[in-house]
Amino acid sequence: MRLDSSRPQDTEAGPDGLEGLGGLEARIARSVAATDPATGARSTTAEIVAWLTERRRDHGTRIRRIPFAELDGWSFQDDTGNLVHRSGRFFTVEGLRVHDADRARAPWQQPVMMQPEVGVLGLLAREFEGVLHFLAQAKMEPGNRDLLQLSPTVQATRSNYQRVHGGSGVRFLEFFTDPGRARTLTDTLQSEHGEWFLYKSNRNIVVETAEEVAEDPAAEPDFRWLTLGQIGELLRLDNVVNMDTRTVLACLPTPAGPRPARHTDAEVSSWLGAARARSRLRAEPVPLARVRGWLRDEQAVRRPDDRHFRVVAVAVEADGREVGSWTQPLFEPCGPGVSAFLFRHFDGVPHLLVHARAEAGLSRTVEVGPTVCSPSDDRGHHAAYAEFVRAAEGSRVRYATVLSEEGGRFLYAENRCLLVSLDGVDDSDLLSPPPDYLWITPGQLGALTGRGHQVTVQARTLLAVLNSGAVRLS
């Protein structure tokens, strides 16, 4: 089946029996339902897992920690102490001073990554026999626990795709940068971790092509076509689907689902606007050398008590990357985190308990986050929600998987990602949230995501779990 890329495709029926449904949402639903060749996928999920295992073995990547003195091209500036690359590109490690007038603690200071470039996170889509597939890449990142994970078709900063590193070009980039090469399905700017980046954005794109690309596994050994349903199955496995794939999937249209919602879309927007208006969190860059409460030795920039995170350095040797070897700084968390949505059905409709979350590095200060997002949750009602998530077991836990954060910038940054049911719980403290929490439907969360810079990267991961069918709340 060839797709006319000049207009939307309205398929009248699919292998899952969605007769009469047209448009992108129906095509996404068909892709979610296709998990093996019998239902329209080009391969089995077991074959995809075997392919990833083979690529991990064949890439031959080696990572080792190094002292800062062994960094090649990176150095601490004499005047500011900032850690910079000699090209002036990629990113810098600087200092940040943060003040929150609503908290008793004094202004705190920390290192922060500054990366003003807007990167491209792109998935290439194509129909095969009436089922939408997405071209995923087996990509190594030095900070991943298992090194190689399932990434989008393209995952590149501007410095990477402009080849500042002097390496080879980015495969399939032209589908996302050349006007008219492919039809856009979604294209939004989204934030990254506001606790480690200052005002970082990436362009999250899904485009569709009718061209016959990446058909031969021998010619493109690091790429495979997968359905959304297969990616959903892989999202049930620890550390397989990387953060960049998850955030792009979250930007696909989320089915509106059953109504009524507890709050109208206008009320949800008003709630978020009010949270932004009353936030008094302020951040300003400062030289890294002037950051108080942190020390720098030969191996790390860290707190004396080794809490929160460290800035470290690594040397990388990797086959199959644009550059075969390099050194770079990474942020290393001092422990794993937790990202969790509590959910509950109201009149038969699933709702997520979302949090208007303030992070110093977000360009709009407040975005919609999960109910629990540790290790930084330490205020007010957070404790009750975090304790419920910690104690949850059995059928209450509908989803629990360990997933890595961005392995190109963070070393072994992992979160246990959960969806935990509050159905049947009769606890007014849990069911009557404070003003910075709200019950909304997954469809409403998807609508917010589609507007860009409204939903945190942690919440987008959990939305991707729902969008891909990894778990169903109904």
Image (cartoon, helix red, strand yellow):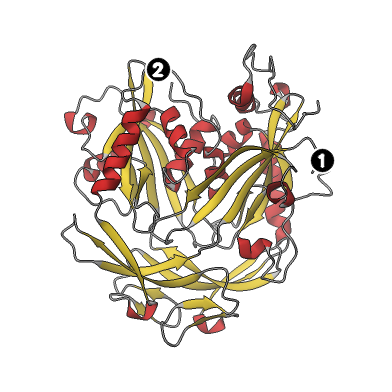
Mark 1 / mark 2, whichever is N-terminal: 1
Q: Amino acid under label 1?
A: Glu
**Going by the image, does 81 lie left or right of 227?**
left
Q: In this rendered view, identify the residue nearer to me: 388 or 123.
A: 123
Q: What element carries label 1?
A: loop
Q: Which amino acid does label 2 sit on?
A: Arg
Residue depicted at 25% across the width and 41% down the height: 436
Identity of the residue drawn at 29% across and 33% down: 438
Q: Residue at x 32, y 72 (%)?
A: 303
Find residue 215 and name its label.
1
The C terminus is located in which quarter?
Answer: top left
Circle number at residue 259: 2
- Residue 106 falls in image quadrant: bottom left
Numbered tag placed on residue 283 in the rendering: none
Taking the image as drawn, is residue 133 in sight?
Answer: yes
Horizontal relation, residue 156 to residue 469: left or right: right
Q: Distance between the residues labelled 1 and 2?
A: 42 Å
Label 1 crowd bin: few (<14), some (14–19), many (20+), radius 10 Å: few
